[in-house]
């Protein structure tokens, strides 16, 4: 093309434009597709993909790649890869395996890796929860749900609950002083007859007991109620209790102590519980 009235530059420009147009055609721009330039809508589902298939490049680096592709700079960059070291697989239960967790327990006793390992998981169980008796709903098994009513009654006749100890009774009293604000308040009441339900239990028919009564006993958390009166009392209960908790008077009048209401278990009859609200009063006579 040399010597043809500088047509070489014009032909070269045309060829460059054609090559750039073909490369840009293969890559979708923000205006080549319908509504491509609009802001993306709320993503309802994000499909999972391997990390190797996810492009973590920034918008600036993607723009640089597009410019390099248009300019013809498509040469691959040589990246340095560190050699991988193939170590021997550690067998579960081996001496090195046990020694690793023993060392981890000594240096980092609150490590999450110890929460599912025997015997280290016991250190993560709250002390107050470990002292509480087992809630009655936890005795239910999937096999029990498949039994007929007659078979279920026979199984109930053979059921024996674990005996309550005095430390367990004391732990329940201490953990349920916040009443409905504590989840233990409902879990320990499930399946047991409380003082508020005793009159209804005595009045219902044994042949056809009230279903709503049974459900309220077995699922107390699902049968919570809230009215304007109860909300008002909950709002003023704590200030009144604090005002009357410990009032010191003169030596002739003594003092008064008001204790929070909590659950009281009876070790000799574990299916009946009551709430205790005690007011102690002493005076020097």
Image: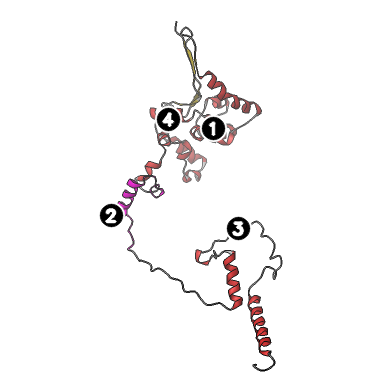
SS at mark 4 in the image: helix
Q: Look at mark 4 in the image and give the residue it sits on.
A: 171
Q: Is residue 112 magenta?
A: yes
Query: Which residues are the magenta region?
Result: 88-115
Q: Would you place residue 106 above or below residue 16 in this image?
A: above
Tell me, yes or no, whether the two marked residues, 3 and 1, touch with CB atoms within 8 Å: no
Q: Is tag 2's residue or tag 4's residue first in the polypeptide sequence?
A: 2
Q: Earlier in the sequence, mark 1 or mark 2?
A: 2
Q: Give the mark, 4 or 1, whose residue is nearer the N terminus.
A: 4
Residue found farthest to the left:
95
Q: Quadrant of residue 134?
A: top left
Q: Which residue is mark 1?
A: 181
Q: Which mark is residue 45?
A: 3
Image quarter of residue 268 = top left
Single out the residue that lies furthest toward the bottom: 3
Image quadrant holding the N terminus, namely bottom right
Q: Quadrant of the C terminus?
A: top left
Cα–Cα span, label 3 and label 2: 45 Å
Residue at the spot 71% in from the left edge and 67% down from the top edge: 34
- Name, please, the residue furthest toward the top: 285
Q: Give whichever of discs 3 and 1 has the lower sequence position.
A: 3
Residue at the image point whose x is 57% and y is 64% from the top = 58
Alpha carbon of mark 2 to alpha carbon of mark 4: how far?
Answer: 40 Å
């Amino acid at each position: 093309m040399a010597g043809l009235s500088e047509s070489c530059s014009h032909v070269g420009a045309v060829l460059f434009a054609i090559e750039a147009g073909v490369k840009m055609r293969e890559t979708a721009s923000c205006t080549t597709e319908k509504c491509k330039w609009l802001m993306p809508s709320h993503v309802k589902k994000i499909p999972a993909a391997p990390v190797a298939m996810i492009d973590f490049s920034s918008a600036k680096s993607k723009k640089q790649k597009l410019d390099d592709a248009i300019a013809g700079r498509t040469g691959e960059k040589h990246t340095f890869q560190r050699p991988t070291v193939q170590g021997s697989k550690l067998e579960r239960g081996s001496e090195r395996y046990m020694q690793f967790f023993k060392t981890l327990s000594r240096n980092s006793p609150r490590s999450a890796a110890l929460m599912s390992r025997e015997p280290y998981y016991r250190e993560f169980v709250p002390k107050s929860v470990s002292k509480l008796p087992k809630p009655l709903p936890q005795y239910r098994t999937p096999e029990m749900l498949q039994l007929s009513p007659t078979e279920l009654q026979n199984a109930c006749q053979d059921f024996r609950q674990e005996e309550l100890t005095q430390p367990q009774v004391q732990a329940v009293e201490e953990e349920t002083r916040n009443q409905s604000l504590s989840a233990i308040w409902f879990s320990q009441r499930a399946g047991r007859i409380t003082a508020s339900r005793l009159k209804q239990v005595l009045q219902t028919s044994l042949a056809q007991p009230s279903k709503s009564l049974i459900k309220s006993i077995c699922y107390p958390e699902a049968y919570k109620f809230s009215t304007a009166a109860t909300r008002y009392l909950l709002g003023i209960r704590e200030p009144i209790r604090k005002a009357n908790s410990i009032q010191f008077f003169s030596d002739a009048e003594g003092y008064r102590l008001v204790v929070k209401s909590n659950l009281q278990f009876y070790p000799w009859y574990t299916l009946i519980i009551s709430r205790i609200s005690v007011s102690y009063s002493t005076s020097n006579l």
